[in-house]
Amino acid sequence: MKAYERFLKYVEYPTMSCEESESCPSTEKQLKLARVLCEELLALGLDDARVDKDGYVYASLPKNFEGEANAIGFIAHMDTSPEASDTDVNWQVVEYTGVDILLNEEKQIYLSPSDYPYLTDYVGHNLITSDGTTLIGADDKAGIAEIITALEKIIESGMPHGKICVAFTPDEEIGRGADRFDVDGFGADYAYTVDGGPIGEVEYENFNAASAKITVQGVSIHPGGAKGRMKNASLIACEFNSLLPPDEIPELTEGYEGFHHLLSMSGEIELANLYYIIRDHDKEKFEEKKRGFIAAAKAINDKWGEGTLVLDMKDSYYNMKEKIEPCMFIVDRAKQAMEDVGIRPVVVPIRGGTDGARLSFMGLPCPNICTGGENFHSRFEFVSVEAMEKISDIIVKIVENAAKDGKK
C-alpha cells in the first residue's frame, strides 16, 4: 500500500486532543485510531504490537542478521491540533499546476500561491487538501503512514536490518506526548520523530518553552463614583501586556528569534486572565524573557497593590540540541539517507517542539525529520503524495545504512 493511501484511511478517524481533559489520552477518539494502527502492525508481522493503558502504540521488528546494529526508533503522534477541526474531512487529491486551488466552490475558498508562495515548489505534485473547512491531519498522520509504509517495504524486501522500534503517541499537540512514554520498554538506542514539514528538512534544535498564566484581580464599583476606587482587571491585563517587548511576538520573528505569544485573554472588571507561551532557542535569552514577565508582574503590583496580579509560569520543554550534539551521527545518518534517495537535506531549527525534544532529555536522543506537509494546524494544510512516498524511502534507507555501518 502507498503511504498516501494509508494516510487517507487514517484521515477518516478524528483524533483531536483536548487541553482541558485530564485523562490520557485526552480524548477517547484517539484510542480508535490507536487500535486500528495496532491491528495493522500485527498484520505486518510485528507480533508484539500493543496499545497500552494510556493509549500509546508500541511495536518492534527484531534484528534479522548476525552483525551488530543499533536499535532504531521511529515515532509519530496520533492526535491533531485543537486549532482547527479534523471531523468530517472532505479530502481531495489535486495535480498541482501552479495556479490557485479551489478548495470549496460553495464557500469560494482557495489555496493560493499569493498567500503561500512556497506552494509553487509543488508544481507537478499531487497534493492532498481538505475542502477548506477542516485540516487534513498530515500533522502527524502523514508521519504514521510513512513509518508503516517503510516497515512494509523493509519486510517485503528481506533486507538486513537491526531492531526497528515504532511508537505512536497521543496528545503531542497539547504538550503531553512524552508524559507517559515508556523509554525503556520502547527499546531503541536512538529514534527519529517523523513530524516535520517540507521534504528534506532535518531538525535537532527546538525552542526552550514555558507557559505563563496571568490572573488579575480587580475591584468593581459604580462608574459614577469610581475615581480612585475602581481597579479594572481587564485594563490592568492590557497594561501588563504593554510592558512586554512589542517586537518579540510570532508575527515579527523567524528563524532563531524567540517570542512571547498571547494565546487567549478574557476579562471583566473584577477578574481577567491572560495565557501566554514563551519560546527561545537560546537558553539565556529564554531565561531573560521569563525575567521580563516577572518584572512586568512586579511593576503592576507595585502600582496597583500587592496581589493584584498573579503570575503562574512553568517550563514546558528544552532545546534538545545539547542532547543530540554528543551523538551527531544520528543527524548525519538522516542526511545521508536523504542524499541516497535524491533529496537535498536542509538542517533547520524547529520553531516549536516535538515529542523528540522531551524524549531526548529522557535518555532517548531523538531528532526530527520531515513528513512532506505544509500549513499545519490550518484549514489550508496540504501534503504531497510524492513527498510522502519519498519519505518512506528515506526511513528505509536510514535502516539500511545503519545495518551496514554497525553499532555506534
Image: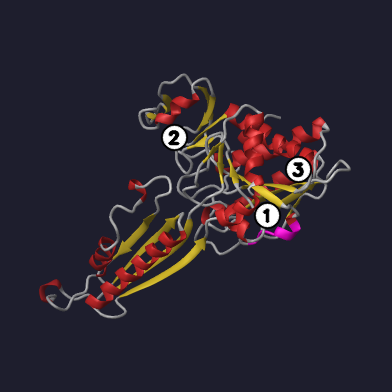
Q: Which residue is mark 1?
A: 56
Residue nearest the observer in this picture, 176 or 203? 203
Q: Secondary structure at mark 1?
A: loop
Question: In percent of the image, x 78 and y 38: which residue is there?
Answer: 404
Dot placed on the residue nearer the N-terminal end, 1 or 2: 1
| Cα–Cα span, label 1 and label 3 | 13 Å
Residue nearest the observer in this picture, 21 or 404? 404
Residue 187 appears left or right of 217:
right
Is residue 6 at all visible to an observer of this figure? Answer: no
Q: Which residue is mark 3?
A: 41
- Residue 357 magenta-drawn? no
Q: Quadrant of residue 46?
A: top right
Dot placed on the residue nearer the N-terminal end, 1 or 3: 3
Residue nearest the observer in this picture, 11 or 113? 113
Residue 394 appears left or right of 65:
left
Q: Nearer the viewer, mark 2 or mark 3?
A: 3
Residue 200 % position (x, y): 56, 34
- Residue 182 magenta-drawn? yes
- Residue type for callout 3: Leu
Q: Which residue is mark 2?
A: 132
Q: Secondary structure at mark 2?
A: loop
Look at the picture and state if 234 lies above or below 157.
Answer: below
**Residue range (magenta):** 180-185
Look at the picture and state if 376 lies above or below 279.
Answer: above
